[in-house]
């Protein structure tokens, strides 16, 4: 018979590269499955285990508004423009303010006229009071002398009656002047105080009106122009909306989670591939509806608790109204760390 050369079995080779490749592929598959499981777990329950929320970069809000009904004559700023405090933003006119100023001016003029009359009358009363006192003394002395003459029979009765009547009228005029003097002084004081109040009111009104110039209250950026040239607005209606230059993140945190946020907690603020540091400076005691871009389609309007996050020193804040993601800066959530500390002997 013919003997065939014995061949080595393929599966019994001492060095088999395919086996190593299969092992690597197997571990990569397991790692991929685990990574997918972790991602699904984080996607589904991550927001309940550690801080994982969204927010908007905003500034301190402010508005330009008039405290009285006005007609807009001109708008001097544009949307997106950087503005400074006390910069003139709009020119307006108000018929109500013009009428109020005219009414107060006429009232002040009438009171000034009345005060002038009272001062003249007060000066006259003060001058007459001295003469009335002298007249009363003379009339009393004359009556006493006539009574002496009458007792000696040297004076007729009608002369004595005339002297008594003269004394009575002088006394009456003196008392009338005495009574009128404090009344005039009180009226002068009251009128002077009323004039001061009216002048202060018209001064405040002129300062508030400022010839129809409405000014920017803070340094910031104009976000919205509400009123147009020629439009009529009511008292308190905003004409221009703006945000301050000092930016911060207004974050929305879900409630009922395993973690909690507190003032002083450090967070990561992520914008795309950029990450900046921040600190929670205020936890508001209220919840608010999420902005429209944060709401889920075909779902009820969601409300979450508000937090304020300040950017760390040296960090460059993103532009206003940038949508950002907030993440806890700590690898281990506070509730996990507390759980392990409690279980230590």
Image (spheres, rainbow, N blue to C red):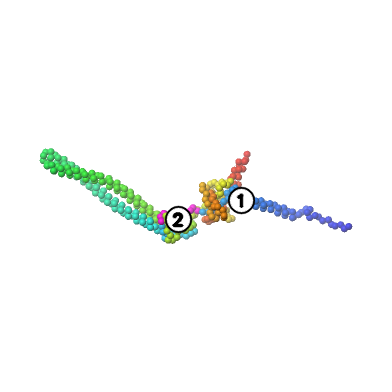
Visible residue check, residue 286: yes
**Nearest to the observer: residue 220 or residue 32:** 32
- Total numbered circles: 2
User: Is there a contact, CB below 8 Å, between mark 1 and mark 2?
Assistant: no
Is 215 contained in the magenta span?
no
Decide whether the magenta segment is chiefly helix, strand or loop: strand
Q: Can residue 142 be seen? A: no
Helix, strand or loop at label 2? It is strand
Q: Report the magenta residues as a range.
A: 59-69
Q: Which residue is pictured at 53% across the width and 52% down the height?
A: 289
On whether residue 68 falls in the magenta region, the answer is yes
Q: Position of residue 89 (x, y in %)?
A: 44, 58
Q: Residues within 10 Å of mark 2 (few under 14, many from 20)?
A: some
Residue that badge 2 annotates: 238
- Which residue occupies 11% across, 39% down? 153
Toward the viewer: 104 or 279? 104
- Looking at the rendered image, the quarter that the C terminus falls into is top right
Residue at 54% across / 46% down in the picture? Answer: 262
- Compute the Cα span from label 1 to label 2: 43 Å
Question: Which residue corresponds to mark 1?
Answer: 44
Q: Quadrant of residue 90?
A: bottom left
* Quarter of the N terminus within the rendering: bottom right
Measuring from the top left, give residue 312's x and y in whole percent: 54, 51
Upstream in the sequence, badge 1 or badge 2? 1
Residue sitting at the far top? 151
SS class, disc 1: helix
Look at 60% across and 43% down and name the residue there: 339
106 vs 306, left or right, is: left
Q: Residue farthest to the right?
A: 1
């Amino acid at each position: 018979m013919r003997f065939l050369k014995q061949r080595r079995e393929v599966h019994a080779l001492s060095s088999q590269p395919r086996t190593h490749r299969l092992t690597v592929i197997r571990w990569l598959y397991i790692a991929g499955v685990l990574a997918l499981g972790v991602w699904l777990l984080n996607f589904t329950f991550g927001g309940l285990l550690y801080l994982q929320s969204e927010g908007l970069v905003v500034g301190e809000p402010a508005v330009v508004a008039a405290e009285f009904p006005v007609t807009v004559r001109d708008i001097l700023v544009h949307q997106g423009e950087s503005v400074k405090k006390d910069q003139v933003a709009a020119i307006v006119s108000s018929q109500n303010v013009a009428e109020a100023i005219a009414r107060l001016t006429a009232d002040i003029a009438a009171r000034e006229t009345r005060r002038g009359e009272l001062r003249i009358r007060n000066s006259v009363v003060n001058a007459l009071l001295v003469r009335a006192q002298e007249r009363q003394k003379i009339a009393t002395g004359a009556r006493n002398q006539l009574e002496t003459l009458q007792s000696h029979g040297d004076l007729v009765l009608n002369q004595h009656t005339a002297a008594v009547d003269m004394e009575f009228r002088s006394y009456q005029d003196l008392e009338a002047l005495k009574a009128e003097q404090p009344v005039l002084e009180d009226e002068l004081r009251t009128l002077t105080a009323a004039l001061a109040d009216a002048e202060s009111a018209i001064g405040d009104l002129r300062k508030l009106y400022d010839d129809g110039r409405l000014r920017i209250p803070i340094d910031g950026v104009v976000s919205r122009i509400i009123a147009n040239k020629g439009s009529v607005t009511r008292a308190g209606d905003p004409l221009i909306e703006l945000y301050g230059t000092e930016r911060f993140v207004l974050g929305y945190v879900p409630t009922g989670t395993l973690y909690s946020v507190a003032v002083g907690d450090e967070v990561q603020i992520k914008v795309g591939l950029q990450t900046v540091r921040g600190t929670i400076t205020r936890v508001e005691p209220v919840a608010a509806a999420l902005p429209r871009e944060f709401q889920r389609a075909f779902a009820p309007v969601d409300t979450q608790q508000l937090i304020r996050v300040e950017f760390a020193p040296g960090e460059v804040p993103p532009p206003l109204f940038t949508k950002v993601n907030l993440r806890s800066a700590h690898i281990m959530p506070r509730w996990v760390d507390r759980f392990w500390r409690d279980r230590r002997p």
